Amino acid sequence: MRFLKASAVLFLLGFLFVSCAKDNNSTPNQPGYKLIEYGEISENTQKPSFINIMFQVTDMQGNGVSSLSTEDFEVLENGDPVSPTESAMQIRKQGSIPYTLKTVLLIDNSFSVGDKLPEIKNAAKSLVLNKLDNQEIAVFVFSENPVLLQDFTDNTPDLVQTIEDIELGNPTTNLYGSIAEAVSMWEDYYQNDDIQQGFLVTFTDGSDTQGSSTLQEALQARGQKNAYMVGLGDEIEPDVLKQLGNAGFYSIDNVSELAEKFEEIQNDMAEFANSFYWMNYMTPKRGDNDHTLKLYIENNANTGEDSYIEGTFNSKGFTSVNQGLYVNTTETNPYGIDQIDMAAGDTTTLDAITYLGSNAPEYSWQTSDNTVIKLTETYDPGNYNIKAFAAGQQGQSAEVTVNDYANGMEKTITINIVESSGTTEGLVAHYNFTEGSMEDAWGSFDANNYGATPTEDINGNAEEAMYFEPNAYISTSQSPVSTGPKTITFRMKSEEHDRRQILVANSLDSESSDDGFLIAKKADNTLEFFIGNGQEEGHYLSASTSFTLGDNNWHTVTMVYDGNKLKGYIDNTLRTSASSVTGSETAPTLGMQMGGPFQPVNTFFKGKLDEVKLFERALSEQEITELYE
């Protein structure tokens, strides 16, 4: 049985990991396990009758536990045990969902390090050389000030070279300010289809001698983010480093011990990252009734309140289903599709699910004719879905088959290539938000949702657009478009008309520099379009409309840039234009964001967005009309 779908309603809360400070003189481990839940059970149900529970298991000292299996857990519904066999209960691990481990390596290069620097660099390189496949590392050094040498990357040679190039700094140590700067590099978040977790790994041979920041400021900046501290020699302040190192503090007497400690920290991070679990089963409960659920580990020496997860769920609308393998299921169509129509050049996602399988599914996809329908891996952990590209011509068709080898099941659907309903040449990303999906329906730039909710679209269809309230936004880790000709189009309906609000952008929107593109609604309800083309204030290509949007109606907004001229359309009518007179277009430094936020002011959007499309070319007037119609 498939454990999680990308469209599953796992609206997980942004809780942060809890870990216990430890050092090389820690007391013996206490027996037992702790369970940490992410998201409410009542929110994590999915029709036809799935119960999903996302949680983490640690030992009593806060170390991640990754060795448990389905047989180690017991589930009670209304006090009665749930049969693992009849419910097709599955336990999945961290590899079942996109996961990124962000690690900031903060190295003290103050003058006091002296001739120990080469060995420190060798130890740091050993950590990089043993990095995980899903781990991205950033490198800082600090003495008088923190200096970012390498932003987050998974490129091992670049990281090794960055560390090799480290030189001695100044004879002062800004430990507290450097920690505050380093932990600002990432945010921990837990989404239904994306998890990001970060760790700070700091090495120092002394204490904060600069005094420009305080310990309290460093602790406040760190918050509940995970930090390891490694201190060398007798000039460190162990009590201070213990407070800062909530994930672990290690004191060493000789720099030759550093590589071993870095290896221990790397193994600890890997174990902690792998201590995520997802439990999924099909409940037998039916009817509009509330039920209690309790999950615990059998024979757990810990019997406290943190030894179990407990909650309630309602079984309204739950139904039984036939065992089998299905493609593109929905709540209203639990058995999915048998065929699908696509226009030539279109891409769609095919999503597999196994009902009542006795084993964790293992999927494999095949096409009957690669020249008609071409399949592309999505590289999503679990490999539940595939991208299907209509490579053939109108009137052709091909069969796509998915096999679940673990459960001996197979499903075949037919894909027909039909007449196109709109231009797709140069299209690189399309967000239709169907049922709240954050998937890129065309390309590979799937998005993450931070608080936006599904809502009615322009035609009144439920859950076909996204509603934004202040502090809600949607983002991609990489922008679908960069420099050069481009077209961005979307539908919008604004509800608040007294402040500037970001609609779609990949720009810093900074007072000192601008890059990328930005479409925003201004405080007077007009629209602003710009392309960043310089590093100094005011050096950007900008155009604003005189047409106002204060009517609470849907509008289609389109920005076209041909490399020189910028045009802004509202409802298929050209409303503004401008030509470049200075500078040159600069590449974005951010992923794309919809609905905000950008600094230095609060620019969150309030209203609805739908049908966001991005093209890597300037569309013609006729093509813009086709899209609008």
Image (cartoon, rainbow, N blue to C red):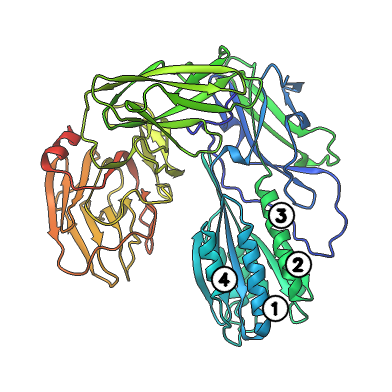
| Secondary structure type for disc 1 | loop
Relative to 343, is 21 above or below? below
Above or below, 60 against 389 in this view is below
Contact? badges 3 and 2 (CB < 8 Å): no
Residue contact between numbered discs 1 and 3, judged by CB atoms under 8 Å: no
Residue 318 seen by the camera = no
| Residue in the picture at 13% in, 59% down | 578
Task: Tell me which numbered mark, 2 or 1, is placed earlier along the sequence.
Answer: 1
- Viewer-nearest of discs 4 and 2: 4
The crowd level at tag 2 (other Cα within 10 Å; few <14, some 14-19, many 20+) is: many
Marks 3 and 2, how far apart at CA? 13 Å
- Quarter of the image holding residue 258? bottom right
- Which residue lies under the disc numbered 3? 268
Q: Secondary structure at mark 3?
A: helix
Q: Give the residue number, with chain letter if any, for mark 1.
A: 205
Residue 25 visible in rendering: yes
Where residue 275 appears, as percent x and y from the top left, is 69, 44
Inter-mark Cα distance, 4 to 2: 21 Å
Q: Look at mark 2 in the image and give the residue it sits on.
A: 250
Where is residue 83? Give x, y as percent: 73, 19
Residue with the mark numbered 4: 163
Residue at 67% from the left image edge and 69% from the top image edge? 123
Mark 4 or 1, closer to the camera:
4
Residue 588 in the figure: left or right of residue 67: left
Going by the numbered disc 1, the residue's amino acid type is Asp
Residue 423: quadrant of the picture: top left
Compare residues 367 and 330 and report the one nearer the observer.
367
Residue 416 image point, x, y percent: 31, 20
Q: Within 10 angstroms of label 1, few (less than 14), some, or many (20 or more) residues?
A: many
In which quadrant is the C terminus drawn?
A: top left
